[in-house]
Amino acid sequence: MTDKTLARRAFVDHNATSWLTARRFAVPARMVAGAGERRLAGDWRGACAAAGVDVAIDLPDVANRFGAEVAGRVEDDLRHLVPDLVRWHLPRRGRDGMGLLTPDRKIRLAAYGDVTLYVVTPAHIERPQRPELRLAPLPLARGRQDDWIQGRYLWDARETHLLLHRVGGGDRTPFFDRDGRPRAADGVDNDPVALMERVLTLQDAGEVEQAWAVAGVPATFPEAKRRWGDPGADDQFPEGFGAMVPALVPVARRLLNGPDAPDGILLRPSFGWTSPVLLRLDDGELRASRADRNTRDMLELHRVHWQRFPDVELLRTDRITTAELHPLVRAALFPDEADPGYQPRVPSVAATAVPVRCRGQWHKVGWRDGRTYTHDHTEEEAQRERVMRALGGEVPGCFTVAETWQGSTTARLPRALRELRSHALTALAHGNADEFTHLLDVGVDPVGVRDRWNRGPLHKLAKLHGDQEALLKRLLAAGMDINGRDGKERTPLAAALFDGASADLARAMLDAGADPLAVDIASDSTLHLLRSTEADRIVPWLVEAGVSLTDTDEYGRPPLLAQVLTSAPAATLRATLDAGADPNCSDEYTEQTILEMIDQYDRDDLDFLVAAAKAAGVAEPEYADDDDD
């Protein structure tokens, strides 16, 4: 078995399907071009908007709170921030192959004394794939963060070239020449890149302990006993498999020899069921072993310092070409390569017509003018077969497939159409309006693009990066129902508001006939679900239409309380309060007051609501000022 095959088995089969999907759907060429244009023009906010990165930073407020010097340093970093590159490198889930962002993850970018610039990923896997840029004076929550402060090559345009040293420790990328051509590992002594190649090759062959030893770190990783319910052996990578050991050695030694040095350093991999690795100094010698279960208080070395770099692994295993790399990543890894232009390769799908077995013959079902179309049957035949189905008669395969796509029946679709649906849903999940629009352009009927919760494109409009109002008009023209319900009985308007819809999109949906008074299966109204930063415009429309500020959901929560529970933006809560919502409310199910809920969910951005609740006579939680936790 070749090294390349071993690498594919060990890394790509488990992790890289998600990374590959993310590279092809999450960072489209138009996003990179638009964000780059705004960044080079000095418009960092415009660059973030083009890259689908929300901004919760007000520089004048930063100056007032932390001083002009800190505000100046923050602004300087923001001018050099590459938001599309941040999106490229953000941690992603590897288990489902979708490549969606790891939820509720905080990534530290820079520190200014006690103030931290960071990015936070969406709170839930189904939320729009829009990370948010923030500035906070307090330490971030332990266990849910990555630290890129020493990895500015992941986001700072001034330091992206340093990525080359990160992946190999020398002047070229492991297994490649500087111009991007593959090369065999040469084993040259005293060459840091050759050493990295030897380590990775040994890991690929399953010789993990030897790989660590070659890098100068004796390692003991006894075979773990498998427990009932563990995944198969192919999913159980040895401890220390994904570590680029030569890169982490100097970092670990510096930390373990420094002032207030920890007893050990923990490496916690992001894939598989692999146990963490513990690094300790033993008589001055760095050693690695399997970590025991008592690792809560160990210093964890962030993955940016040591874990394999996904783009290099994707290139090694022929999953991508250099033209599919983010332009700044490609320029860093292959400085002598002529620029091929950024060309993300979106997988091809059967978007025209698919073969269907119909009464002993192979026919084709496809699209015409955005509608499902049976190529081998006349309209008169189609009408006759619809009558036959209504009467309970057997319907030929072509019509069964067409009606299943449109949701009239529940028969199994041909594989090509299942793949097409999955492709369209992936584009929607990543917010890739360009790819979804391309499918509409070739005639695909959007009615059949539904997920397991029966949510279609109208329900997912607020997730898309692009002209949402234009897409709304196009989807309605294709026959989609503006008030169609999903599996939770939510309308497209309710789903869009929960996804943080802009005021313009909400207005367009209301003007198109969306029902603002519809409630879902849990009795949540559109106000209960509202999570928009432009709520100051949306809330008056809903209230004027008759949406109640006091009606409760099935748990006895009025909209204001539900918004706290769902981590709605402060702007949403302020708009609801300004519309007349009573802060002296409680959850009938748990009897929590709004102050108790704010305290429980650690909301530090709702001072206005806290003041309003106290003024309304709400008692402070007894544990609100407890400093012992």
Image: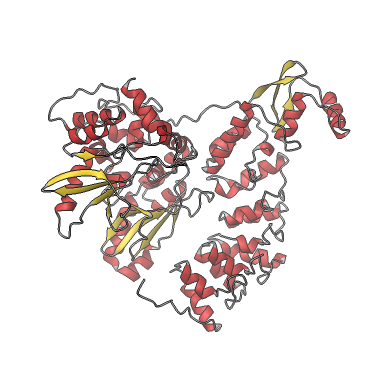
For the C terminus, the image quarter is bottom left
- Above-or-below relation of 81 to 619: above
Identify the residue at horizontal 35%, vertical 34% (top origin): 311
Count the numbered circles shown: 0
Q: Residue at x 59, y 63 (%)?
A: 537
In the rendered image, which quarter is residue 117 located in?
A: bottom left
Task: Reply above or below: 535 against 131.
Answer: below
Residue lying at 67% horizontally and 30% vertically, measured from the top left: 413
Image coordinates of residue 26 in percent, x first then y, are 47, 40
The residue nearer to you, when weighing 349 against 356, is 356
Residue 298 position, x and y percent, is 27, 55
Outermost residue toward the left?
283
Residue 112: image quadrant is bottom left
Asked if one can make out residue 510 in the rendered structure from this viewpoint, the answer is: yes
**Is residue 340 in view?**
no
Of 499 and 143, nearer the camera is 143
Residue 592: x %, y % from top left: 55, 73
Above or below: residue 1 compared with residue 427: above
* Residue 156 sits above or below residue 617 on the image: above
Left or right: 55 as drawn, with respect to 612: left
Q: Residue at x 56, y 34 (%)?
A: 423
Relative to 483, is 278 on the left or the right?
A: left
Quadrant of the drawing holding the N terminus: top left
Rendering coords of residue 121 (x, y %):
44, 52
